[in-house]
Image (cartoon, rainbow, N blue to C red):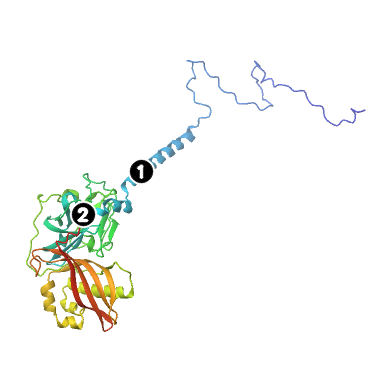
Amino acid sequence: MGEQGRRELPRPPRRVPSWAAENAPEPSGPRTTIEPRRRAAVAAAGGAGGDELPPRFRPRFVLPLVVFVLVLGAAAGWLVRADSLSLDTKDVQEAVGPAVVRVLATTCEGTGQASGVLLPGGLVLTAASAIRSPISVAVLLQDGAVRRATVNGSTSDGVALLSMAGPVDKPTAGVEQEVPDPKAERAVVAYDLGGEQVVVPAGTAEQPRELAGVVDAGALGAPVVDRKGRLIGVFTGDTVAAGKIVPTAALPFARNVTGLFPEPVKTCQSRGPQTPVEPDLAVANTPLAGEVSTALGEYLDALNQHDFTAMQTTYSTRLRSRSSAKVDASKHGTSYAFGAVIDKVAASGAASDADADMMFTVLFSPTSTQANGQTCAQLRIRYHLVREQQRLRIDGAQTLANRSGCDTD
């Protein structure tokens, strides 16, 4: 009775398919059971079939993979090469910045302001346009030192070679002896007309960058360097727009090198660069110190421009009565002042007058009044300024120090 109530169907007995049985003959008809794909018998060692491809090998999948690996490798190689040709302006400035100098000169043309690069032995390369018909020349180093310089000559490409006076213990630029890769990036390391050092990418030899509008005339004479800060040329010319890069192969590296021509010296009323002068304040920038800086800056501008009538307007009524534009011209007719620093300012008198100490370097002709054959000097002068017509004017000056030769280190 229990069996009559059973609803399950009886399970069939487990059977192994005849084709799966060991040593069973290959079936001839269709199979009703899913059977695995049989592998071809592997031939015995040394027999036929030993070179057959693995069962999973798919040439159509492997070929794109090979192409991808090749493309990736080529791209990696290109990136490595591109990195070796590019430069970082910060790295370049750290490498060569201390060897880049400012060149200032009094000339018959009044052009004397440029950049330059210091080489071993106290030699300096710069732009010939800045020292044309030189009267006096000075080199300003990055550490603030001021050195006299003589002009050895200039090349037909417009590069001048100077010899700097004093010890030759300053950082110098390394020179790249091989011709740079035309695809390698270059940079110009220069001082602008305001006296700030700048690093400007200059493109490559194949694709040079137009520098007009990017740098000012202070960049003429600046070194052109590679990614390691090594000298590969000098940027020179009469103007930035007409400037060019002279490669190292055409640069003079010795005083008596072939192709170096002496710069003619003329008799003239020389003058220095006409860039406005703004004294640096080494004291707190109080309202009084700001007024002093403005008054002394106007005085130095008039001095450098040799506008001695304008110089008279910076004097007090009392000082003008004791001087004249003609007297100033006889004293300062070849002078050019730079590097002015005001390091002391004090109120004086009930009318908010002031006393101020200012240091600066002045270039002049060795034949000028009281020059004594020198071409430059470092001065420290105390100025007394009085308030007239609501502004400070120079009422007197006392020389505290006069270091002739201007080699400040």
Residue shown at 50% from the left, 30% from the top: 57
Quadrant into which the N terminus falls: top right
Q: Secondary structure at mark 2?
A: strand
List the single residue furthest toward the right: 1
Where, by quadrant of the figure, is residue 209 drawn? bottom left
Mark 1 neighbour class, 10 Å CA radius: few under 14, some 14 to 19, many 20 or more: few
Residue marked by disc 1: 80
**Left or right side of 253 for 10:** right
Q: Position of residue 313 (x, y in %)?
A: 20, 80
C-alpha separation, residue under disc 2 versus residue under disc 1: 31 Å
Residue 117 shows in the view: yes
Q: Which mark is residue 336?
A: none
Q: Secondary structure at mark 1?
A: helix
Q: Position of residue 267 (x, y in %)?
A: 6, 67
List the single residue furthest toward the front: 349
Q: Nearer the viewer, mark 2 or mark 1?
A: 2
Residue 278, compared with residue 171, is above or below; it is below
- Specify the amino acid type for callout 1: Val
Mark 2 neighbour class, 10 Å CA radius: few under 14, some 14 to 19, many 20 or more: many
**Left or right side of 405 for 200:** right
Q: Position of residue 23 (x, y in %)?
A: 64, 15
Residue marked by disc 2: 117
